[in-house]
Image (tube, rainbow, N blue to C red):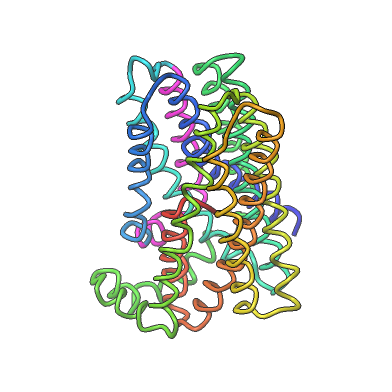
């Protein structure tokens, strides 16, 4: 079981790196280079490949093995880092945007492959719980590494050396996955299930509208879809834009990388872990109501700080506290949301459960958090 957790945790870690780059490092770096908030806001378009995830999920599920998809995508991420290392964003902003778009495309394919591998590896309820913990913690740790740790690296060593470091990280993970023993019996399982995939599920893959109708027909799915698509809209300003205002009010990029990229994300991981403990004692509905009341209060408090921000230790401390609370509540909400999605997926037919989970995975990613 430990081998499975290490395998999944490491893959979700490297999957979280592109998100950390775009959500935390890139906005701060571009703002420090003099780019407008409007241009920085347009970088959200680079998440577009995740919209197409549901279209190529059947291809990843049916063609080749998970090992090959994972090695290919992780190696591709390393290659994009090598290309990014030779492109200065001040002079080649569109080239950098292209490499980040490629990173999102590769990361979305990797997400499909690693989720499929996890479904095959994790059998018992205990394994599923530990596997989901590895997913959340691994992804957020990767985001912390990219959004906080690498922000300190780029401040000292520069853009090129930061991406060279990332290239070596991805190369090491690709070699690890290539020799990972947890995937040794994957080919046998794939051959055994191939016949069923060519049946009704294969017909649905050729007619996507049939599959989408089946997904929407699962009890609770329409309302869950609406919730997943909207529940983090307000948080985007609190988590992504608020740090940029701090950068404009005499907080350095290194300070921001530490407090927003490391400490605040640590609070997010604590919130995610606490969510699992609370679910053992309270219903999801009751927890959701209480947590969203707290989220509303914390966002009102953070908004009030924008009217009185000044370069003083007290206001800097209040701003850091506000960011930490937002990340803590965000992590807690993420765990509750994943549980809600899992309950809904369990109501679906077994033949479409993986597509159902993939669909929700797309939506949660579009809201830019894991």
Q: Can residue 139 be seen in the rendering of this structure?
A: yes
Residue 69 in percent (x, y) is at 45, 48
Q: Is residue 227 left or right of residue 92?
A: right
Residue 21 in percent (x, y) is at 50, 34
Residue 168 in percent (x, y) is at 58, 26
**For the stretch drawn in magenta, what is the main secondary structure?**
helix
Magenta stretch in the rendered image: 58-85
Determine whether 209 is above or below 305 in the image. below
Front residue (pair 275, 88): 275
Determine whether 299 is above or below 205 in the image. above
Instruction: Determine if the magenta segment contains residue 160.
Output: no
Q: Is residue 220 left or right of residue 255?
A: left
Residue 342 in percent (x, y) is at 55, 73
Instruction: Determine if the magenta segment contains residue 82.
Output: yes
Q: Where does the C terminus fall, quadrant-wise?
A: bottom right
Q: Is residue 105 left or right of residue 242?
A: left
Give the residue at x 42% y 37%: 103
Front residue (pair 47, 65): 47
Give the residue at x 31% y 59%: 55
Front residue (pair 325, 98): 325
Give the residue at x 60% y 26%: 251
Q: Quadrant of residue 97?
A: top left
Q: Is residue 118 left or right of residue 83?
A: right
Determine whether 342 is above or below 131 in the image. below
């Amino acid at each position: 079981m430990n081998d499975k957790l290490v395998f999944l945790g490491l893959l979700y870690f490297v999957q979280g790196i592109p998100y950390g780059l775009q959500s935390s490092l890139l906005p701060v770096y571009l703002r420090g280079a003099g780019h407008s908030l409007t241009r920085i806001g347009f970088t959200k378009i680079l998440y577009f490949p995740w919209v197409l995830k549901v279209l190529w999920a059947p291809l990843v599920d049916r063609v080749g093995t998970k090992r090959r998809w994972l090695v290919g995508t992780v190696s591709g991420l390393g290659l994009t880092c090598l290309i990014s290392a030779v492109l200065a964003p001040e002079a080649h902003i569109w080239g950098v945007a292209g490499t980040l778009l490629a990173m999102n495309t590769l990361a979305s394919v990797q997400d499909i492959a690693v989720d499929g591998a996890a479904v095959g590896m994790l059998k018992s309820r205990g394994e599923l719980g530990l596997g989901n913990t590895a997913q959340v913690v691994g992804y957020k740790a990767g985001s912390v590494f990219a959004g906080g740790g690498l922000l300190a690296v780029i401040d000292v060593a520069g853009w090129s050396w930061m991406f060279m470091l990332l290239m070596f990280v991805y190369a090491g993970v690709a070699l690890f996955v290539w020799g990972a023993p947890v995937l040794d019996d994957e080919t046998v399982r794939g051959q055994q299930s191939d016949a069923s995939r060519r049946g009704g599920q294969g017909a649905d893959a050729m007619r996507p509208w049939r599959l989408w109708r089946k997904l929407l027909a699962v009890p609770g799915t329409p309302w869950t879809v609406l919730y997943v698509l909207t529940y983090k809209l307000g948080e985007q300003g609190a988590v992504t834009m608020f740090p940029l205002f701090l950068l404009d009010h005499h907080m350095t990029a290194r300070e921001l990388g530490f407090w927003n990229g490391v400490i605040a994300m640590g609070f997010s991981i604590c919130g995610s872990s606490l969510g699992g403990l609370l679910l053992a004692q309270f219903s999801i509905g009751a927890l959701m109501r209480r947590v969203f009341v707290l989220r509303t209060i914390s966002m009102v408090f953070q908004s009030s700080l924008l009217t009185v921000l000044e370069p003083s230790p007290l206001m800097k401390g209040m701003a850091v506290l506000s960011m930490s609370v937002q990340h803590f509540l965000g992590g807690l909400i993420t765990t509750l949301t994943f549980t809600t999605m899992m309950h809904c997926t369990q109501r679906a037919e077994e033949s479409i459960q993986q597509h159902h989970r993939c669909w929700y995975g797309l939506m949660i990613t579009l809201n830019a958090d894991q």
